[in-house]
């Protein structure tokens, strides 16, 4: 049953331990009468340990070390770090090596998006508290989700060298590149994954979505001729169009008291990165076949409803399957697994599209190739301010909802953006009662 | 019998790496090992097809570091206390119950949890956790020499 807001009544919503986001976080919302007075997304992110840890290490170690930051998207960390270091070293990675990197990244998109769609986000829309209850009623769908996700994992295992924390990527290319036959062996699975992804788009497109469409500033990479994954320029729907190297001139990070994660702004304003931003700024770069599927699922060229991000993720998963098949078919084994790299003093920036949005890295190194400065700006810290803004707007527009309903919707508002909060310590919290 | 060891946790987050540490040594002893890492949907995949599964992972309960928790997954859904306190997006309990729902939970599944202390970025286990991991490894090796069954001394309880 709904509640009518009373002028001087204070309502507080607290969610102490947010479920179904990657990592740990908490939410605090305070409403007085019809006024949303305070919104805080509390983040228990470990400090930027890695930036300090990298200083004094060889540039060659950086991709493997940064891959350990996140257990869900290690490839993004490897790719952004390689690009930054290659820019500093004046190295270009092109042709089959660049294509293999894109293929590896497709694996990560498939794996990460499928995890979010089915295991973190979908239960919200179908009214289930978790995936277990969902699987009880839809076992076939969950089995398919596991198969889809596993195909992404297998691509990452083949190109990344092992199942988790991949180790086959290096500055300049790879330690080992696959034979064409090894890639072709994955083709049938990818065909099946594409079919599942297509069914997923159609299914999530049929869900009900709250009417909510903030006027976002979207930021993503953009490069003519391909949907953005690995490179390009940084663009927005408000006229931004800059080189990655100029990122820090316009984007700034600040500490806020309630969070150990830094908050990023674009010229002092919040902005959104991730699937919604990529889609809106690069819809024309999707193949016509994928655009048509998106259209059938209710997505136009512009989508500002964050609840529909589940559909956008499904469309991107379908794209990643198609792109992986295209890259495998076009693959020609390179002469060498990497291009030669010689240490020299310099600095460079790199940016790639992690599943959750742009991931920026910048490094400075000395003449021996030892890191003297490192900066890493992950997508979640860029989205945090915008998530709080979403919460503020959503709560203000839905004060008539009951407390449990509003709390659930707030949690869902956060999950819309798939925040990766602490990047990966999985331990089980146990509370044991002792009998006398 | 198909016995499989499933290691949960991140080996680059200090004591969270206790599962991978134990699993690595069991692999050297010839056991089939599946490293789950941080993404527990992989646990659902890893359980499929096994007759017996040993799940090794770090635990935080407030007990002294190195305490061993042993629990055999029974025919009933796992205790709600575990579910309520599972701290992550898609946790251990949810993964095991999902496997059960999908019909892929092995006939026998035993969880070995070692109480951790340090979870910040970095490699290596704290001394008490290292000691407990070695003791568990020895117990499991001995059990393997004696029989195929995991040495569950107490069910659904913790051993301090």
Image (spheres, coloured by chain):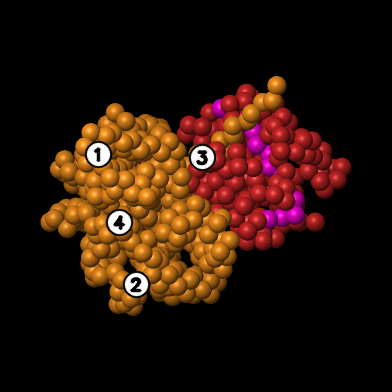
Chain colours: A orange, B red
Quick one: SS at disc 2? loop
Identify the residue under disc 3: B87
> Residue drawn at (37%, 50%), measured in percent from left and top?
A1
> Is residue A364 shown to the viewer in this render?
no
Secondary structure of the residue carrying tag 1 is loop
Disc 3 residue crowd, few under 14, some 14–19, many 20+, Cα 10 Å: many
Magenta stretch, residue numbers = B105-117
Q: Secondary structure at mark 3?
A: loop
Judged from this view, the residue extending furthest toward the right is: B146
Mark toward the start of the polypeptide (2 vs 1) = 1
Number of residues whose C-alpha sits closer than 10 Å to that of mark 1, classed few (under 14), some (14–19) or many (20 or more): few
Mark 2 and mark 1: Cα distance apart in space: 40 Å
Tell me whether the residue at label 4 lies in contact with that at label 3, contact meaning CB atoms closer than 8 angstroms: no
- In front: label 3 or label 1: 1
Q: Are marks 3 and 2 on the same chain?
A: no
Q: Chain of mark 1?
A: A
Residue drawn at the location 58% of the way across and 26% of the way down: B62
Query: Mark 2 — residue?
Result: A297
What is the distance, in whole Å, between disc 3 and disc 2 at their CAs?
34 Å
**Position of A358 relative to B63 (above/below):** below
Residue B29, position as x, y percentages in the image: 75, 45
Q: Which residue is mark 4?
A: A306
Mark 2: give few (<14), some (14-19) or many (20+) Cα within 10 Å.
some
Instruction: Single out the mark in the foreground, 1 or 4.
Output: 1
């Amino acid at each position: 049953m709904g509640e009518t807001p009373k002028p001087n009544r204070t309502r507080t919503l607290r969610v102490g331990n947010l479920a179904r986001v990657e990592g740990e976080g908490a939410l605090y919302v305070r409403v007085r009468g019809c006024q949303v007075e305070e919104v805080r997304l509390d983040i228990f992110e470990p400090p930027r340990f890695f930036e300090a840890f990298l200083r004094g290490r060889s540039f060659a170690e950086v991709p493997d070390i940064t891959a350990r930051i996140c257990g869900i998207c290690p490839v993004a960390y490897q790719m952004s770090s390689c690009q930054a270091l290659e820019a500093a070293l004046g190295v270009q990675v092109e042709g089959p090596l660049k294509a293999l990197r894109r293929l590896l990244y497709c694996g990560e998109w498939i794996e990460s998006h499928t995890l979010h769609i089915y295991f973190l986000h979908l239960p919200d829309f179908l009214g289930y508290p978790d995936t277990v209850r969902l699987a009880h009623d839809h076992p076939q769908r969950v089995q398919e989700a596991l198969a889809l996700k596993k195909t992404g994992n297998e691509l990452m295992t083949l190109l990344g060298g092992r199942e988790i924390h991949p180790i086959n990527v290096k500055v300049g290319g790879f330690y080992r590149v696959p034979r064409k036959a090894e890639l072709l062996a994955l083709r049938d699975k990818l065909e099946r994954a594409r079919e599942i992804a297509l069914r997923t788009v159609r299914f999530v497109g049929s869900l009900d979505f709250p009417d909510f469409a903030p006027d976002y500033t979207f930021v993503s990479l953009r490069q003519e001729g391909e949907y953005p994954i690995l490179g390009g320029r940084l663009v927005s729907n408000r006229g931004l169009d800059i080189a990655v190297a100029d990122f820090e001139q316009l984007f700034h990070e600040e500490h806020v008291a309630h969070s150990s994660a830094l908050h990023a702004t674009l010229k002092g304003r919040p902005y959104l990165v991730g699937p919604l931003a990529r889609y809106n700024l690069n819809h024309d770069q999707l193949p016509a076949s994928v655009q048509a599927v998106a259209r059938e699922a209710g997505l136009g060229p512009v989508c500002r409803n964050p609840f529909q991000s589940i559909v956008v993720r499904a469309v991107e998963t379908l794209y990643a399957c198609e792109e992986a098949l295209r890259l495998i078919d076009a693959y020609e084994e390179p002469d060498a697994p990497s291009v030669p790299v010689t240490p020299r003093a310099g600095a460079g920036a790199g940016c790639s599209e992690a599943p959750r949005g742009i991931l920026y890295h910048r490094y400075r190194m000395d003449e021996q190739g030892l890191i003297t400065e490192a900066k890493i700006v992950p997508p979640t810290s860029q989205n945090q301010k915008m998530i709080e803004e979403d919460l503020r707007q959503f709560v203000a527009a839905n004060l008539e909802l009951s407390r449990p309903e509003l709390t659930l919707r707030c949690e869902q508002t956060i999950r819309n953006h798939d925040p990766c909060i602490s990047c990966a310590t999985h331990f089980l919290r146990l509370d044991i009662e002792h009998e006398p | 019998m198909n016995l499989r060891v499933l290691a949960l946790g991140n080996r680059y987050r200090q004591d969270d790496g206790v599962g991978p540490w134990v699993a690595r040594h069991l692999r050297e002893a010839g056991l089939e090992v599946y490293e789950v890492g941080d993404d527990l949907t992989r646990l659902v995949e890893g359980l499929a097809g096994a007759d017996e599964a040993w799940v090794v992972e770090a635990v935080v309960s407030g007990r002294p570091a190195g305490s061993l928790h042993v629990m055999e997954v029974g025919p009933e859904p796992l205790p709600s206390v575990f579910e309520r306190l599972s701290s992550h997006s898609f946790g251990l309990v949810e993964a095991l119950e999902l496997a059960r729902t999908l019909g892929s939970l092995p006939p026998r599944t035993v969880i070995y949890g070692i109480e951790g202390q340090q979870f910040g970025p970095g490699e290596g286990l704290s001394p008490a956790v290292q000691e407990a991991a070695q003791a568990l490894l020895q117990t499991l090796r001995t059990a393997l020499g004696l029989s195929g069954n995991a040495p569950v001394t107490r069910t659904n309880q913790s051993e301090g």
